[in-house]
Amino acid sequence: MSKTLRIGLLGLGVVGGGVVQVLAKEKEKLQKQTGVAISIDKVLVRPGEDKSALAKKYGFVLTTDFEDIVTDTNLDIIIELIGKVHPAKEFIEKALQNGKHVVTANKDLIAQHGVALNQLAKENRVSLFYEASVAGGIPILRTLTNNYLADEITDVMGIVNGTTNYMLTKMFENQLSYQIALEQAQALGFAESDPTNDVDGIDAAYKMVILAQFAYGMDVSMSDLEIEGIRSLTKTDVQAAQALGYEIKLIGRAKKYGQGIAVSVGPTLVDKYHPIASIKNEFNGIFIESSGIHQSMFYGPGAGALPTATSVLSDVVAIAKNKYLGIEPPLFNHFKVDTTLASDLEQIDSYYIALKVNDLAKVQAIFTEQAINIKKEHQQSDGWFVICEPIAKATLKELTPKLSTYAKIERVMKVIGE
Ligand code: HSE
């Protein structure tokens, strides 16, 4: 008799609907390739939500009671697609405790409670997989955990939020205002229900916490990250960046400096010839530097029903393969070392500094005194925009008060592609 995996699905929104659709389309192929018949048997919807047409079409039962799913002994996997932390956390905990494998796309939850949830999965000898939580359709987490194990990663940087990349592309290329660009991103369905997390860099930060775990085996918490969104970017920033030969992207970065790492999210100047600059609109891209492979980039859709659903199902496939082979459920990410955060002295990067100057000669003299070499500069009325050679973050912090008598620092951003 062939093996089976029965799924209870929590949430039938955009991604949930995609999972139902993709599974129905690929069902036969999946059974042939994994040796396991996979079916969605029960779906949790909100009270009053009418999904009866979908239930009839795809042959599953609808319920509004989570208990109905978590206590159903016929179900092997719970796919959580309701998002946010509560009640998703409590649902997942109960599912794991009841011996069910869990697949989720919930980056908010995994970034904040992933360590404890992974431990719970291990104790209950079930799998907890979350490929779709980072960069939607790009298969980055399983690639890191498999293909980079024999490598040493030194830098993971990229665009992991589709909404802000869409907005910045429209602001750069079509001169759209911030507000119109945001409204378009919302209308196209890329933004979170409340876009605050997108534009303030929080959504990208959640994803970077997860990427750091897979790339370096280190658990950083959200409070360890420096996070800045795109809300305060101005036309002047965009024009100055372009004049210097750069684009502004919201970059998530987890970089190794010595033995420690620093994880950040912020608007960043990207050289217009760097591969990351080619990532436009809602697309995501993750650029990795490592000692073995050297440079690699993973590009694709970071959101959307079918890309995210396909990632969710890749986790179901992994569970099916393990079941077929009778393998003890593995942790998604085995790589774990002590977490070390890089100091301000160790963090050496190239910076863009935008200044409103009242005495340019004095300001230039301060740069010289501090031994900060300027690589590129642009002047526009009382604005002086410079890109400096790599300096320690500690040096940058010392520079700020020294400049304040002769200039106002309007903005500081890291630079990629130096
Ligand atoms: N709001 C997110 C984004 C969706 O724009 O990337 C995918 O996590």
Image (spheres, grey):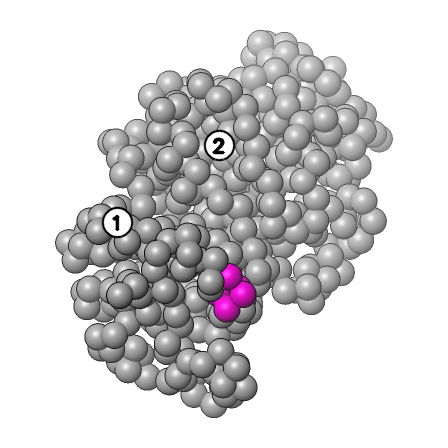
Residue type highlighted by circle 2: Val
Q: Where is residue 173 drawn, in percent x and y?
A: 81, 44
| Residue 20 locus on image (x, y percent) | 49, 70
Q: Secondary structure at mark 2?
A: strand
Q: Quick one: label 1 or label 2, which is nearer the N terminus?
A: 2
- State the image coordinates of residue 248 (x, y, percent, origin top left): 68, 38
Left or right, residue 204 beside residue 387? left
Nearest the eye: 2 or 212: 2
Residue 14 left/right relative to 315: right
Mark 1 or 2, which is nearer the eye?
1
Residue bearing the label numbered 2: 156
Q: Was residue 124 drawn as part of the magenta stretch in this picture? A: no
Quarter of image, res 412: top right
Residue position marked by numbered label 1 in the rendering: 325
Q: Would residue 37 be seen by someone viewing this image from the given angle?
A: yes
Residue 6 in picture, x, y percent from top left: 33, 69
